[in-house]
Amino acid sequence: MDFLDGVLLSFKSLFRTFTIYDFFDILIVAVLIYGLTKIVRESRAGQLVKGIIIVLVGYFLACQLHFKMLSTIFSNVFQFSVFGLLIVFQPELRRALEQLGRSNISDKLSLSSIKKDEDAYTRDRKRLITIISDAVYSLSEEKMGALIIIERKTKLGEIIDTGTIIKSKPSVPLICNIFYNKAPLHDGALVVRDNILYAGGCILPLTKNNSLSKDLGTRHRAAIGISENSDAVAVVVSEETGKMSIALNGVLKSYDDTNSLKKDLNKFLIDK
């Protein structure tokens, strides 16, 4: 009974000193923890976090059991752990900062952002999606490999610099010609910026995810790689099977028909 009374008194004392600033403080920390947990669960960092937890548990047990040598080793390791974590989690930290930069908050705080004509932009976007869907279907039927990267908020200037500038209005024949197996640009990726075909033959970073199927070729690994490092939507056609896929946020999804592919492109590129 005394224990319960003590707990109640502690809660009463806490609520007396609790202010609106404390509420926002807790809310911000909760949002940060939620965002960090989401990033870890959607990436390879999940296994690394499990390893870190095991090491921390080992350190705690070593201290409790008075294993002096083991405790000393752990404590010396932890002195340099901050730098190690920055190196190990560099892709996840970069991704988190990019997501923060792409957030609506940063858009509202940006005084230099100019609002586009949304109606005209949406019309061009829908036309682009229809053209890409039709082109991908044609390429799939002919079993011609293709990799189309649609830029969103993360700018792909470094990727564009590796290719050849096209800057052309989108059309099915042009896309098919770019990926014709004897065309000079067919091996690289086609980057779409502001609803136009901006650059072809671009070189992309390959994913470092070792848990992927070994059946995936270079195109699919490049598509996953660019989706891990940016918010771009990558559309892939397999040269071996003609299978159509979309890579987004490091996840690859395959499609059996263009209707479902077109539906997801609308969801990723237009729907808010």
Image: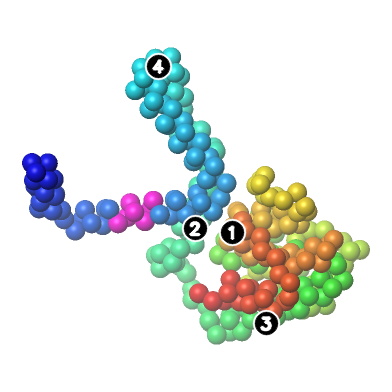
Calculate the distance from the C-alpha at mark 2 to the C-alpha at mark 4.
43 Å
Task: Kindly indicate whether the residue at mark 2 contacts the one at mark 3 (C-beta within 8 angstroms).
Answer: no
Query: Which image quadrant for residue 155?
Result: bottom right
Calculate the distance from the C-alpha at mark 4 to the C-alpha at mark 1.
44 Å
Res. 127 mark = 3
Res. 249 mark = 1
Res. 73 mark = none
Calculate the distance from the C-alpha at mark 4 to the C-alpha at mark 3.
68 Å
Q: Position of residue 143 (x, y in %)?
A: 85, 67
Q: Is residue 109 left or right of residue 173?
A: left
Calculate the distance from the C-alpha at mark 3 to the C-alpha at mark 1.
24 Å
Res. 67 mark = 4
Calculate the distance from the C-alpha at mark 3 to the C-alpha at mark 2.
27 Å
User: In the structure shown, which secondary structural element does the residue marked by tag 1 occupy?
Assistant: loop
Residue at 59% over, 59% down:
249
Give the magenta-colored segment's residue range. 27-33
Q: Is residue 243 left or right of residue 97?
A: right
Q: Is residue 72 above or below residue 141?
A: above
- In terms of depth relative to the viewer, which is nearer, 259 or 199? 259
Q: Residues within 10 Å of mark 2 (few under 14, many from 20)?
A: some
Marked residue nearer the N-terminal end (4 or 1):
4
For marks 1 and 2, give the one nearer the viewer.
Answer: 1
User: In the structure shown, which secondary structural element does the residue marked by tag 3 occupy?
Assistant: helix
Residue 30 magenta: yes
Q: Position of residue 235 (x, y in %)?
A: 70, 66
Q: What residue is disc 2 on?
A: 99
